[in-house]
Image (tube, coloured by chain):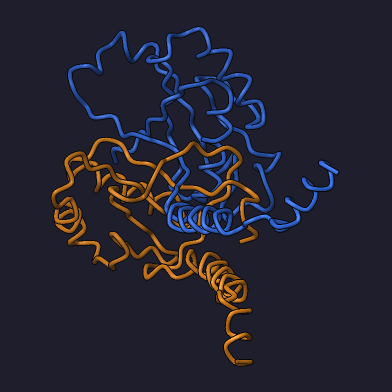
Amino acid sequence: MEFNNKGSGSGLQSEINITPLVDVVLVLLIIFMVVVPLLMEGYDVDIPRASADTSAHVAESQLILSIGSAACPILGPPAGEGIPKDCQVTLGDQKIPATELPARVGEILGGRPAEQRALFLAVDDRLNYEGVLRIIDLAKSGVADLKIEFIATN
Amino acid sequence: MRLGESGKMQASINITPLVDVVLVLLIIFMVMAPQMRRGPDVKLPNTTKPNSQGDERGRILVSIDEAGGLWINDQPVPAEHFGDALNAAVGTEPNPSVVIRGDAKLHFVQVREAMLAIEQAGFHGVGLIAKRAGAEGK
């Protein structure tokens, strides 16, 4: 009988009150609506200035990545993802396929302290912007905290 | 008597259809909002792992459209007044930083010139905005 009484008691409130749930969901929706279009992703880059700290011993340890339009012919937006397989870049003084970039950059810069991990880029003007960003993406995936500096003085 | 009784039976308004309509409106606006930019039509480059650049509020947005036209905070700016417009855009921002939204079809030289102009206007470093590949259909 007691059991029955309890049963009828719960029968009084047979439906869950969803109003607070709906309120919370609505507020969450509004928050995401406002924030999501404003979030951006990309790459921090820098143009180094000619100044006193560009001394000889710094220049010695600089790792320069040259991307030429002859060895790496990305003149239009690359199709799909990644970069074309025939793209070759010059890292330091070695010519390597761009696909080997993450491994080589990690090898050379991985041993340095994080604040000295900088890659200097000399990029051919005729190259496609999206292709250049994809190469930066590759290089950055090789080592954490990699700073990208453009040699773009002329 | 009968009228009074039926009034008692339906004491509260049924808000379910209202909530449905509001939810649908919300979803419609959510989908439309990114396409309602006033600024230039820029198709951002796709890359695999772009880093977070945070919120676009408080940043100076420099856009370069497919034709090479320059925009600052969604306003078109002639190339010869770019530096002045950039300094004007700083306003009261205590720590201004600049991001470039360049179209994927651009040649690197157009972005490089914009970066140089930004550097000459006195800003250190820029963010190059990309889109995570496959994030949204287009």
**Left or right: A131 with respect to B111?**
right
Q: Residue at x 54, y 49 (%)?
A: B131
Q: Residue at x 61, y 76 (%)?
A: B17
Q: Residue at x 62, y 32 (%)?
A: A98
Percent x, y of residue B2: 64, 92
Quadrant (top left, top right, bottom left, bottom right) of the N terminus of chain A: top right
Viewer-proximal residue among B131 and A116 = B131
Q: How many marks?
A: 0
Looking at the picture, does residue B76 appear above or below residue A130?
below
**Left or right: A72 with respect to B97?**
right
Percent x, y of residue A71: 59, 38
Q: Residue at x 33, y 34 (%)?
A: A46
The blue chain is A
Quadrant (top left, top right, bottom left, bottom right) of the C terminus of chain A: top left
**Left or right: B7 with respect to A3?**
left
Looking at the picture, does residue B85 appear above or below residue B35?
above
Percent x, y of residue A130: 53, 49
Chain B tint in image: orange
Q: Is residue B104 visible?
A: no
Percent x, y of residue B89: 19, 55
Q: Is residue A51 visible?
A: yes
Determine the image quadrant of residue A85: top right
Determine the image quadrant of residue B38: bottom left
Looking at the picture, does residue A61 appear above or below residue A10?
above
Viewer-proximal residue among B35 and B109 = B35
Q: Farthest residue in the front direction?
A: A1
**Left or right: A10 with respect to B32?**
right
